Amino acid sequence: MENENRIVPCEEIIAHARKYHPQDDMSLIERAYAYAEDAHKDQKRMSGEPYFAHPCQVALILADIMMDPATIAAGLLHDCVEDVEGVTAEVIEKQFGSEVAMMVDGVTKLSRVDFFSKEQQKAESIRKMFIAMAKEIRVVLIKLADRLHNMRTLDTQRPSRQLAIAEETLYIYAPLAHRLGVYGIKSELEDLSLKYIHPLDYLSIKAKCELNHDAQQALIGEIQHRLRAALEKEGLKDFEISGRIKHIYSIYRKMKAQNKNYDEIMDLVAVRVVVKELQDCYAALGVVHSIWKPVSDRIKDYISTPKYGIYQSLHTTVMSKNSGGLFEVQIRTEEMHRNAEYGIAAHWRYKEGHAADELDEKLSWVRRIVDISGEAGDSSEFSQLLKTDLFAEDVMVFTPASDVISLPKGSTPVDFAYRIHTAVGNRCTGARVNKKMVPLSTPLVSGDVVEIVTSSASKGPSLDWLNFVVTAEAKSKIRAALKKASRDENLARGRDMIEQELKRREYTFPQLFTPAFLEVLYRRYSLQNLDDLYVTVGFGGLSCAQVINRLADEYRKTVHQEAPKPPEPPSELGEKQSGGGGEQGVEVDGDPSMLVKFARCCNPLPGDRIVGYVTKGRGVSIHRADCVNMLDESIDPGRMVRVNWTGQSAGAYEAEIQVRGYDRTGLLGDLSILFAGMNVPLLKVFAVRQKNGTTQINLTISIKDTQQLDKVIRQLQKRNDIIEVFRTGM
């Protein structure tokens, strides 16, 4: 990574910028370069390299995606406010003007003051970035360049940090680059993320790509030669043909989606044809299909229906025995190709004048995200909404007037109605899809023509709609309407729901609803008092389980439940009877050969903080440090001993998790398939159907460590039919 850590000379950055802005004044870049160089002169990166190399590399990336001098200058200065003492937004504005200062402020992270956790701080910083994007789209292009260089040099971070940054990149920043059409950055972010999230898969695919590189290049050459001759014969002369091998993450996704290994994936290469005129695109498509047989369900016309309003191209996958099976052909004009390579960055060049309205229309989704951010319950909810709404695979549906509406996969007519207008959603009483009446919960598919039936006599949205809508936009507007409709009704409903949940969980009101416990809840969800809590639960803004689980967590920390009898004899705590010492992955300080047993009351896993309790004649019982039994007053402190994980796995451990999801046929079967795909055995399953249309599922699984358990929980949380997941057994 030596090349990625070098300080790029100012002249080189300006030379790259002049390719796209030959007439622009570059003095702003020169001044920003000198200022940032001085500001960062005493700072080092974790690699030991000068910190100034980072803003230089960010500026070079921005220059290569056609950005203007002001954006490149902001890229050079983007870390000054955050990382250099005495440099403020006001100082940047005074030195470089309000335009540059606004962009620098937009990418500056929030301080950690007033946040409960690092995760909340991170989510709030992303929220801030979207608000800045709504005013100035160049903010996110700087952030993407910043993230790309950080990913290129991620090997200097510790492994846990590498994984966290790579996952955030894959789930937030790569999809954001995709939505903005900056596909070069998107593909590299995906490949680099895979390198740290699934390193063995990454290295395996990379090695096979390198091994097959010459053969695949020969195949591309053969396809190009045959296609060029056919296009020229048809009379098309002014065109360019290029070929590429698909990038590593794209191949990885195909392997996982199709449950195949590398050698079974057919379409590993793609050929691109760039023509002069629009009509030549369709003429070239006809030529391609005259040479090779098309795969009928893999012909995509993104020219008539642009992807995200930016990306235009014809895609077809064709089959040829002579050319090695399946391969993809993309056909587009030069302008489409420029937009495909640089996305919104290419559009921004033409922001002045007649194209300004067109650009604003293409970025309307950013304003929707800002609206959602103001209505989301808290920062973690906002972050989750981004993953499930903004970055979900899209379906393209039509209004009766043939306007195209893009929605996340799985969206329903209610999602469609709220995308049209809030009033249309609130007055929705029915829907026709392709001229037929359908239930409002019907998932839409690409090509559907959707008509919403409304009534001025409608009482407004139903609470049940929250069980099937997909978009964060619809959820937030439904909740807002329900909240506004009847505070008293929601308050009474919420109080009843919480009382029923308390009774079902065998808690009393005084146990959980203490001022200290409630204060934690109020701060977490921005509530003022108990009535606000009841109202929020009543209109669906919070689930009863969220409230009770949070309060129960506080209760367990400070109040001893009527615990089981003291841990004497060990069978009363239900230890797993198993072998001794380090063979089980745990050893006792000072006596590595001591027999150890894992307590079933809390099921400790490698990665948990643990304590040992000496039992009579049965060795040491291993508990999680936060186990309720270890807090019992009857526990003898003199029998507590230090224990440590040895790093030698005992093979498999039991872990208990509780899942709450929307009740539907096949949910347990789908979860079984999900666990099987992650190689996580299911040991016990107990499900209880709730009256509110949800199902509570208690699962005992065989797991290696807390890292694997966290991965399982994250995978479950990604599903639209899962409301919440948490580990039990405290």
Image (tube, helix red, strand yellow):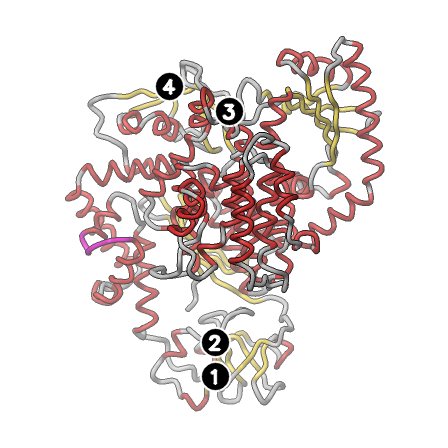
Pick whichever of labels 2 and 3 is earlier in the sequence.
Answer: 3
Question: In the image, which is nearer the foreground, mark 4 or mark 1?
Answer: 4
Eye-nearest disc, 2 or 3? 3
According to the image, label 3 marks what residue?
446
Secondary structure at badge 1 equals strand
Residue placed under numbered mark 1 in the picture: 613
The answer for how far apart the CA atoms under marks 4 and 3 are is 15 Å
Query: Could you tell me which quadrant the C terminus lies in?
Result: bottom left
Amino acid type, callout 1: Tyr
Which quadrant of the figure contains the N terminus?
bottom right
Pick whichever of labels 3 and 1 is earlier in the sequence: 3
**What's the magenta region?**
526-531
- Which of the two discs, 2 and 4, labels the residue nearer the N terminus? 4
Check disc 3 and report its element: helix, strand or loop.
Answer: loop
> Which amino acid lies under the numbered mark 2 shown in the image of this protein?
His
- Asked if residue 562 is positioned above or below residue 446 in the image, the reply reads below
Q: Amino acid at mark 4?
A: Glu
* Disc 3 from disc 1: Cα separation: 60 Å
Disc 2 target residue: 623
Callout 2–callout 1 Cβ contact below 8 Å: yes
Q: Which residue is mark 4?
A: 451
Give me the residue at 29% from left, 62% from top: 520
- N-terminal label among 2 and 1: 1
Q: Is residue 575 above or below residue 445?
A: below
Of the residues under marks 4 and 1, which one precedes in the sequence? 4
Magenta segment, principal secondary structure?
Answer: loop
Tell whether label 3 touches label 2 (CB within 8 Å): no
Crowd rating for badge 4 (residues with CA inside 10 Å; few <14, some 14–19, many 20+)? many
